[in-house]
Image (spheres, helix red, strand yellow):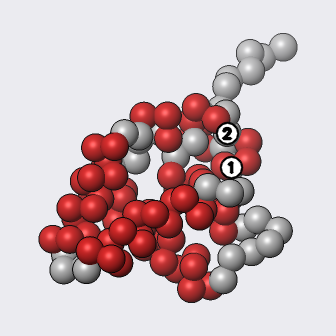
């Protein structure tokens, strides 16, 4: 019988990944496809935030996220000309998306 080769976690769909392998994009996917689907506008906004985060901070596992990542994202938004209020709203989007 051939040995079973474990599948890398990156290749698994988000719902099948162990918690320690989840990344921000995985959480976005789970949130945006849940049964009570968010509005199209909310999904588009969250997608842009995730894309900006990945551009600025890379793609670390959630367990490795720190305040420094949030500050890097905030600084990126501010240097792109986003207002302080909108920047805060985009950063705090994660608080609303956390309720999967």
Which quarter of the image is occupied by the C terminus?
Answer: bottom right
Q: Is residue 41 left or right of residue 13?
A: left
Instruction: Estimate the x, y position of residue 32 in percent, counting from the top left.
Output: 66, 68
Q: Quadrant of residue 35?
A: bottom right
Instruction: Estimate the x, y position of residue 36 in percent, counting from the top left.
Output: 80, 72
- Where 40 falls versus 94 (above or below)? below
Nearest to the observer: residue 4 or residue 81: 81
Q: In this view, does 78 lie to the left or right of 11?
A: left
- Where 18 falls versus 38 (above or below)? above
**Mark 2 = which residue?**
17
Instruction: Estimate the x, y position of residue 28 in percent, counting from the top left.
Output: 58, 61
Q: In which quarter of the image is residue 89?
A: bottom left
Local SS, label 2: loop
Tag count: 2
- Where 51 falls versus 11 (above or below)? below
Crowding around mark 2 (Cα neighbors within 10 Å: few <14, some 14 to 19, many 20+) is some
Nearest to the observer: residue 93 or residue 85: 85
Give yes or no for contact between labels 2 and 1 (Cβ–Cβ under 8 Å).
yes
Nearest to the observer: residue 17 or residue 88: 88
- Where 6 falls versus 79 (above or below)? above
Local SS, label 1: loop
**Mark 1 = which residue?**
13
Instruction: Give the distance between the C-alpha atoms of the residues marked 2 and 1, in whole angstroms.
Output: 7 Å
What residue is drawn where x is 76% and y is 65%?
Answer: 34
What residue is drawn where x is 66% and y is 43%?
Answer: 12
Which quarter of the image is occupied by the N terminus?
Answer: top right
């Amino acid at each position: 019988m051939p040995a079973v080769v474990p599948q890398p976690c990156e290749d698994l769909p988000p719902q099948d990944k162990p918690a320690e392998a989840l990344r921000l994009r995985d959480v976005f996917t789970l949130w945006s496809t849940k049964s009570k689907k968010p509005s199209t506008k909310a999904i588009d906004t969250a997608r842009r935030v995730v894309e900006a985060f990945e551009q600025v901070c890379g793609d670390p596992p959630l367990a490795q996220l720190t305040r420094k990542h949030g500050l890097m994202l905030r600084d990126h938004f501010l240097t792109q000309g986003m207002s302080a209020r909108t920047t805060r709203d985009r950063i705090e989007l994660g608080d609303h998306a956390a309720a999967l």
